[in-house]
Structures are given as structure tokens and as C-alpha cells.
Image (cartoon, grey):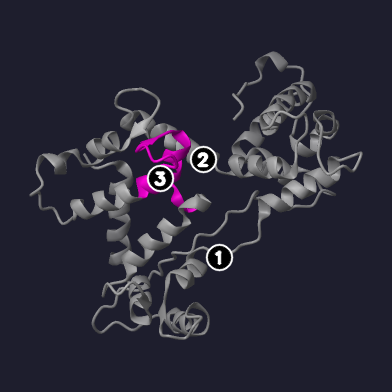
Amino acid sequence: MIRPLLMCFALCVVYATSKPMEKKDRIHHEEALSSREHDDAKGYEYDHEAFLGREEAKSFDELTPEESKHRLGLIVEKIDNDKDGFVTEEELKAWIKKAQKRYIYVNVDNQWNDFDINKDGLISWEEYKNVTYGTYLEDPEVDDGYNYKQMMARDERRFKVADRNGDLIADKEEFTSFLHPEDYTHMKDIVVLETMEDIDKDGDGLISLTEYIGDMYNHEDGQEEPEWLVTEREQFVEFRDKNKDGKMDKEETMDWIMPSDYDHAEAEAKHLIYESDTNKDEKLTKEEILNKYDLFVGSQATDFGEALVRHDEF
């Protein structure tokens, strides 16, 4: 059985190669924390979405101030990882990043039961391999255009990197980093390696200008090249190939696909602490947060409290 993720990837490849004028973007951009403008003078909607995630922020808008404060108090206890009674900038930053990745955790939850065959709350490499490549394992000679042996070896390598303790058994966080490596710092090297393997057609471990352009654009005989290819060639020569040897190595590829973007979560954590830290000790108590609850979460006055929808916190 081929997992939905693999089939989706295959379809994306077919789609990309069927549209030669469409530019492929391999750069992993950090998504904005909110769709709103960050202007506290006009309201705290940006902060609500940054702190809770967009979907969860909507649910708080339905709550009374009392219920909103109560649920915020429960969240504060979760943010305080070391249980010392204070929320630090690092703890708040970690929470914001987790809130922003909630859709990823939902995606993993939706797939979890398919792979956790023995229902022990963990997913071993054997379980994943049997579910994903079961058909190939039964018939290694299957020929449908895919190199399953190569894909399985690549998956196993990534699984081992995601498996922090080396037991070839993944808990929920490890499995999440396996499925979504681009969102985890310790998985960056494997993302770069896989990207280079995809683009490096001559197998020299480097990406040439020809390979770089060939990955973005599927040339067809007699077809005029799009104008953006000129810019991409200039980008490669002037910025991508930093040591000017005509090719991109691992470090140069890392800088290309995973640029050091502005850390929005860190900036928001600093902002929330600055606005709430009444005694200026650069950390927040639960009381300080609840006193500024409207900065962190939304609410609205209503006479129908008993009809409000309740959601589990993270």
C-alpha cells in the first residue's frame, strides 16, 4: 500500500512536469503568524492569532470574558514547562511555534492510526515500512514507474534522523518531524540532502547551474523560455554560488532553500512580554497574563454561555 503522502507527491511531480511554464519553488518560507495587521492601536487580533493559531483564536471570540480567562489560565500552565510559576520568553516562543504548527499535528493525528498497527501509541520503522511498502515487499519486481527500493531506503534514512533516541520507534513528536522535516531544526540537514539528491542529476554531490534551472523548468523543444529564467540564472551566479566554483554545495543549498528568516515567533514573544510584564523582570506570572487577557485571547459578552462550544486546549 502506498501512503497518501507518497501518492500526493507523485501527483505533484506529474503536475509540475506537465506545466513547463510554472516555476518550482523549493525555498521553505516561514508562514506569517496572522493574516491580520499587527497594530495594537486597532485591536489585538494579530496577537490572538499568533498566540493561539488562527482556528483556535476564532473559538475564543465566542467566549465570555470569564470563560476566556479560565481557558487562558489553563493554557498558561501548559506554557510553563518547568513549572516554576513563570513564563519566560523561550517558553512563550516555543508555545507560539507550536500553536502555528497545529495544522501539522492534526495531519499527523489523521494518519497515526494507519501506521500504529499494534496500537501501543508508537510507530516503529517496521510498522511504517509494512504499511507504506507492503505491496512492494510482497512483489519486489513490480514495475509501475517508481523505484520503491530507493524510496524505502530514503524513508528509512529520514526515519533514523527523526528518531532521536535511536530505537527505530517513533513517538508522536518524532513521527511528526519525520513527516514534516522542514519544520524541525534537527531535520534541516536531511531536507538539504534530499533536495540535492533530487536536483543533482550527474551524482557529483553538487548542484550545477544546468541542474538548478532544470529542476525549475521543464524544457520542451521549440518552446520559448520564460523571462524569469534569466533572473534565476543571475541569482545562481551572483548569490547562490557564493564561492564562485560554478556549483552549489551543501552549505550553499542550505542558504538557498532554508534562508535565515526573521523570527516572527521570537518577536511576538518579546512583544507580549513587554506589554504584560508589569514588574519588568522579563518574565510573566499567570496573574500578569490574566490581567492582560484581552491581549492574548479574544472574547465577547453574551447571555448564552451555556450554549458556547468548548474545545480542548493544545
Question: Dividing the image into 4 quarters, which one contains the N terminus?
Answer: top left
- The residue pinned by badge 2 equals 103
Task: Give the image quarter of residue 305.
Answer: top right
Which one is in front, 254 or 59?
Answer: 254
The answer to whether residue 168 is magenta is yes
Q: Does residue 281 lie above or below 308 as drawn?
A: below
Q: Which residue appears at 65% of the width and 39% of the height?
A: 95
Percent coordinates x, y for residue 209 in the rendering: 38, 81
Q: Which residue appears at 52% of the width and 84% of the height?
A: 238
Q: Where residue 178 is drawn, which disc sits there?
A: 3
Q: How crowded is mark 1: few (under 14 residues within 10 Å), some or many (20 or more)?
A: few
Kindly state the secondary structure of the residue where label 1 is placed: loop
Kind of residue indicated by mark 2: Tyr
Q: Which residue appears at 61% of the width and 40% of the height?
A: 99
> Which is more foreground, mark 2 or mark 3?
3
**Left or right: 6 with respect to 110?**
left
- The residue pinned by badge 1 equals 259
